[in-house]
Amino acid sequence: MRDAFPRWSNSVFWAALALTAIAIVGLPATCIGAARTPYFTGAQDPLDQPIDFDHRHHNGDDGIDCLYCHSEAAKSSYAGIPSTSTCMGCHAQIWIDSPQLEPVRRASLENKPIVWNRVNRLPDHVFFDHSIHVNRGVGCATCHGRVDRMARVYAAEPLTMRWCLDCHRDPDPSLRPLDRITDMSFVPTREGGRAIREQLGIKPGTDCTHCHR
């Protein structure tokens, strides 16, 4: 009696079964891995802004403290962005005729906010509080990188769940003295961070409800 299927059909069947199994495992793994790449996280990709604000000049050269413009970072969940009046506090006296600053002057006269493009973005289901981190020794540069060296600001870190959890599980290398929070040139050490953690009683949570509420 002749076989109902040719002999090579067995090889095709097992090959198809293997490819299906690989696809079931590989496709989700590929998607998860891709979501962590700079292409999807936007890390290292400078964004255009409505006004060319150069942090190298304002923070690096002039030494304007991060909290002068992002004044909410130490007391609320949001860091905040500077109001037009904050910008004009300086630029009503310097560079008053600069064409580059015409949008700032116009926004001030019209009493309208400047709409900046968001650089660091977290999913809506993620809760993040700037003040908790700032008041527990996590410096601006830890998450935002050396902003004082950026002509156009970009996301320096991926800000993925794994990246955050790695720090929560081992915060010592990232902690610094509270008077060095905005010091871009300060380099934290594990030993110094351990002392700060013990002094402030820092116990970062790693359970789901800590960040997903």
Image (tube, rainbow, N blue to C red):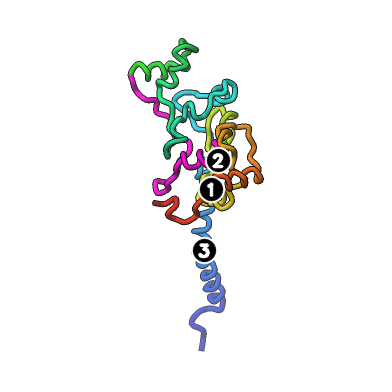
* Left or right of 51 in this view: 189: right
Q: Is residue 34 visible?
A: no
Residue at image coords 46%, 30%: 70
Where is 49 relative to 17, above or below?
Answer: above
Residue identified by numbered label 3: 25
Q: Nearer the viewer, residue 167 or 104?
A: 167
Residue identified by numbered label 1: 202
Q: CA distance from mark 3 to mark 1?
A: 38 Å
- Say which label, 3 or 1, has the lower sequence index: 3
Q: Nearer the viewer, residue 205 or 123?
A: 205
- Say which label, 2 or 1, has the lower sequence index: 2
Residue at image coords 33%, 18%: 110
Extent of the magenta region = 111-140
> What's under tag 1, amino acid-wise?
Ile
- Please identify, in this view, whether the residue under mark 3 or under mark 2 is nearer the observer: 2
Which class describes the residues within 10 Å of circle 2: few (<14), some (14-19), or many (20+)? many
- Say which label, 3 or 2, has the lower sequence index: 3
* Disc 2, SS: loop
Where is 16 relative to 68, above or below?
Answer: below
Where in the figure is residue 7, as x and y percent of width and height? 56, 79
Q: Quadrant of residue 199?
A: top right
Residue at image coords 34%, 23%: 112
* Left or right of 84 in this view: 26: right
